[in-house]
Amino acid sequence: MTEELIASLKSEAESVREQILVVRESHGDEPIDHLNASLEALEQRLADVENRLQLITYRAL
């Protein structure tokens, strides 16, 4: 179960990283409020996923 959760979180983190890259590449550094908000939300989601992954990995040890 733990291994499946870790794999799922790693996959989710990679997906979020890809979404961040797509947004950045398609819009560059344009100061568009809704894009900045989207990037911030994606970056926060990535941080949350990475934190959960670290916690679960630590507990599994």
Image (tube, rainbow, N blue to C red):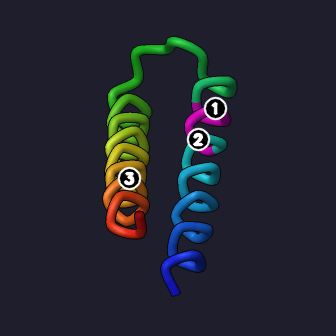
Residue type for callout 3: Gln
Residue labelled with disc 3: 54
Residue labelled with disc 1: 21
1 or 3: tag closer to the N-terminus? 1
Of labels 2 and 1, the one closer to you: 2
48 or 35: nearer the viewer: 48
Of labels 3 and 2, the one closer to you: 3
Disc 3 crowd, CA 10 A, few/some/many (<14, 14-19, 20+): some
In this rendering, position of residue 22 left or right of residue 38: right
Q: Which residues are magenta?
A: 19-23
Work out how far the residue at label 2 is from the one at label 1, CA to CA, in angstroms.
6 Å
**Helix, strand or loop under label 3:** helix
Magenta stretch: dominant secondary structure: helix
**Helix, strand or loop under label 2:** helix
Residue type for callout 1: Leu
16 or 49: nearer the viewer: 49
In reply to whether residue 21 is colored magenta, the answer given is yes
User: In the image, which disc is placed on residue 17?
Assistant: 2
